[in-house]
Image (cartoon, rainbow, N blue to C red):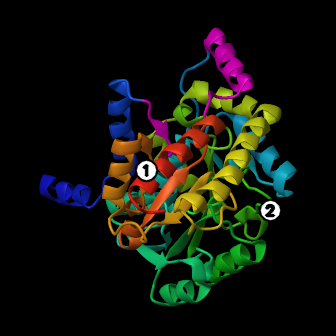
Amino acid sequence: MSTEQTSRRASRVSPFIVMDVLRMAGEMAARGEDVIHMEVGQPFGPAADKAIAAAHAALDGDDLGYTEAKGIAPLRERIARHYEETYGVPVDPARIFVTTGSSGAFVLAFLAAFDAGDAVGLANPGYPAYRNIFHALNITPELIETGPESRWAPPIEAVRARLKAGMKGLLVASPANPTGVMLSADALRALIHETEAAGGWFISDEIYHGLSYGMAEHTALEFSSRAIVINSFSKYYGMTGWRVGWMIVPEPLVRAAEVLAQNMFINTPTISQHAAIAAFDATDELEARKAVYAKNRAFLTGALPKIGFADFAPVDGAFYIYCDVRAHTRDSYDFARRILRETRVAVTPGLDFDPGRGQHYVRFSFCGSHEDMRRAVARLGEWMRAQGHV
């Protein structure tokens, strides 16, 4: 492959705008400004005490060399146990891969399941790294429009039509980023059946499992042993910087994924793997943190409409509110920049998640402290009133 070809492919990968916002917010904080972060999905506080203690024990044991590419057996066995206990689904640990966050899992899954030139369906709006990884791998992201009329889920009629036209798979997240919307069991089952009946691969992004507020969570493995499932210790477990996640692949893809992992990553950081085992047993601490998210959710869904942010997607899970701001702007990027500059509250413009309609939306993240959420609403309310938006 020539340098020219490589540069062309790389140029198709769009910036991850939220990281640009995070950088700008960091620069302001470095100047001594009091910035409130509502832009990134960064859970407040450190990893659970049990996870940190396990990491210390691993350091003391001096057993932090290479592991097999799939990950250490005790962690894969613990993940398998998690599926049995949480969903009633038995999973062979041989099908489980420990990965460098969900990001590493996406790369491995996409390479194992699809060829260059294949088209794969994505809900639009959706997590931008999906389509950007596809672009980097010369896979075509088929953006399937969603909205309030479909409860922000890919309409099954649109999925069926794309599959008939040659689409090779479908990736769905529930709870979803940026909308926070979840699929019912029937809706998830129907999308899996439609995809697999056409011979496609169904990929289920379950990174926000554990973070739902009254609606039942379902893993795709309840409905298919052929589904590819991806999860992570970043969100519910609060271990973003530890870079540890996992994926479960069907038997036909196991060896291909293993060979890819051996060559591309060797293994996930060993210390993070040991910490991750212990994270499963930190339920009390993790549920206490989730209770703060639930409190933030209740506060914001009541307070935001009073200050001009009334039109948002259902907040079934995760820790995001995806809000329509077209009553105030036609340029969400400029709107978010002004909010950051003038209120010191960082929010994410919707263009990150939807290249077309995203200029009408912003995403608020509520995984910070409750005090920060209250301070943010006070600042935003004052600013919105000053702009004449309320």
Q: Residue furthest top?
A: 60
Q: Is residue 318 above or below residue 202?
A: above
For the record, the magenta segment spans 34-62
Looking at this view, is 311 or 246 the one in front? Answer: 311
The answer to whether residue 212 shows anywhere in this view is: yes
Pointers 2 and 1 in contact (C-beta within 8 Å)? no
Under mark 2, the amino acid is Ala
Q: In what quadrant of the picture does the N terminus appear?
A: bottom left
Give how far across and how far down residue 302 sits, in percent: 67, 57
- Local packing at callout 2 (Cα closer than 10 Å; few below 14, some 14-19, many 20+) is some
Distance, label 2 to label 1, CA atoms, is: 37 Å
Give how far across and how far down residue 85 sits, in percent: 86, 49
Please give the residue where the numbered disc 1 appears in the rendered image. 383
Give how far across and how far down residue 244 sits, in percent: 58, 38
Horizontal side of 41 relative to 388 (left or right) equals right
Q: Which mark is residue 216?
A: 2
Looking at this view, is 299 or 141 the one in front? Answer: 299
